[in-house]
Amino acid sequence: MTTATSTPAPHAALSMRAAVGLVAEREITSRVRSKSFIISTAILVIIVAAGIIISNLVAGNGSTTSVAAIGPVAESLETIDSIEVEAVASASEAERLVRDGEVDAAVLPIEGSVAGEAALEIVALDDAPDLLVQVLSVQPEVRLLQEAPVDEGLAFLIAFAFGIVFFTAAITFGGTIAQSVVEEKQTRIVEILLTAVPARALLAGKVVGNSALALGQIVLIAVTAALSLMLTGQDVLLSDLGPAAIWFIVFFAVGFVLLAAMFAASASLVSRMEDTGTVLQPVTWLVMLPYFLIIFFNDNELIVGIMSYVPFSSPVGMPTRIFLEQAQWWEPFVSLVVLAASAVLIVGIGARIYENSLLRTGGRVKLGEALKG
């Protein structure tokens, strides 16, 4: 059974904007001063940087082929990755290095040909290195009728990264909002707060404050990833990923507002921390939906296309399609409008639930009662 108390009359001294700013500032400062928040953010940044650096080291840690070569031949081979060239003065010196095991092979002009042209021979002890044979083989010209698709492994990793970042941030900061709402109800601090600010300003301040924190953390992760890619020389991947990452930040900023309102409204239905799991379960599933869809259907263009327009999954689906170059230039804008309109609608419904449930203590408030007021 729930007990309803009358809503305290807020002071008229504060405007709505000032009240929202006051609550948002309180939310931000209380979180920033928390050691757990600082430590968790530092760990996230370290994981992102370490993951990119280690993966680059592992990818670039392949075996190199040491080659002895003469003059122009040595100069032409020095531009090839995974080949370490040792310039020598004569063919006999190159053969000596091969026999002594100091190099894997030697590349020499065939006697009677001009050095540096195609007439070359590989001199090896008992087996010619496959990489060297492949590099020096005559390759036919290739003409593609359409651009090659993004590597499937890389596409999965990018989609997975978007999904896990969205999932982690939404659950972490959404849970913080829910915990704050229930604690204020359970300790009846909310009754004091409502004497200073109206209920809608209290909700808006919580959403704005935690959205700012979540967005700041996402931007910090994006900057860390960009710097790590630059430091490891992966400029090509950074240029390909840049537009998708920018759109992800934009979609996350709008999408989290929607989810934050749902977390706060759901938490306002209960007065005990033990009951939050039940009321937050539907919202949690909506957050987990993009994550699971990416895991199981990341290579399905139809599913990802649908995800890019559904409000709860578009912050992951649309940036993934942008990275894969599957979206037309206008699609992100249409999807963002759908997401923003959904956020306005959900925030309005959430504000009504929050306002009508905030002062009801005791048992769980039924959703229908909260909507009716």
Image (cartoon, helix red, strand yellow):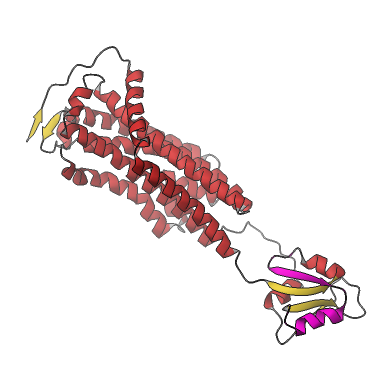
Q: Can you say which quadrant of the picture contains the N terminus?
A: top left
21 vs 104: above or below = above
80 vs 291: above or below = below
In front of the other: 188 or 305 = 188
Inspect this view and state whether residue 18 appears: yes
The quadrant holding residue 137 is bottom right
Q: x, y (%) of residue 233?
A: 63, 53
Q: Residue at x 43, y 41 (%)?
A: 217
36 vs 158: above or below = above
Relative horizontal placement of residue 103, taking residue 117 as reference (left or right): left
Relative horizontal placement of residue 112, taking residue 168 as reference (left or right): right
Relative horizontal placement of residue 114, taking residue 265 as reference (left or right): right
Q: x, y (%) of residue 66?
A: 72, 73
Q: Residue at x 86, y 67 (%)?
A: 72
74 vs 287: above or below = below
Q: Magenta region: which residues?
A: 80-102
Q: Residue at x 16, y 29 (%)?
A: 188
Query: Is residue 258 covered in magenta?
Result: no
Q: Residue at x 38, y 32 (%)?
A: 341
Q: Can you say which quadrant of the picture contains the C terminus?
A: top left
In front of the other: 316 or 206 = 206
Query: Is residue 93 covered in magenta?
Result: yes
In the picture as drawn, the residue positioned furthest to the left comes out as 1
Q: x, y (%) of residue 260?
A: 32, 37
The quadrant holding residue 108 is bottom right
Relative horizontal placement of residue 213, taking residue 324 as reference (left or right): left
Inspect this view and state whether residue 335 appears: no
Q: x, y (%) of residue 344?
A: 35, 30
In the picture as drawn, the residue positioned furthest to the right comes out as 112
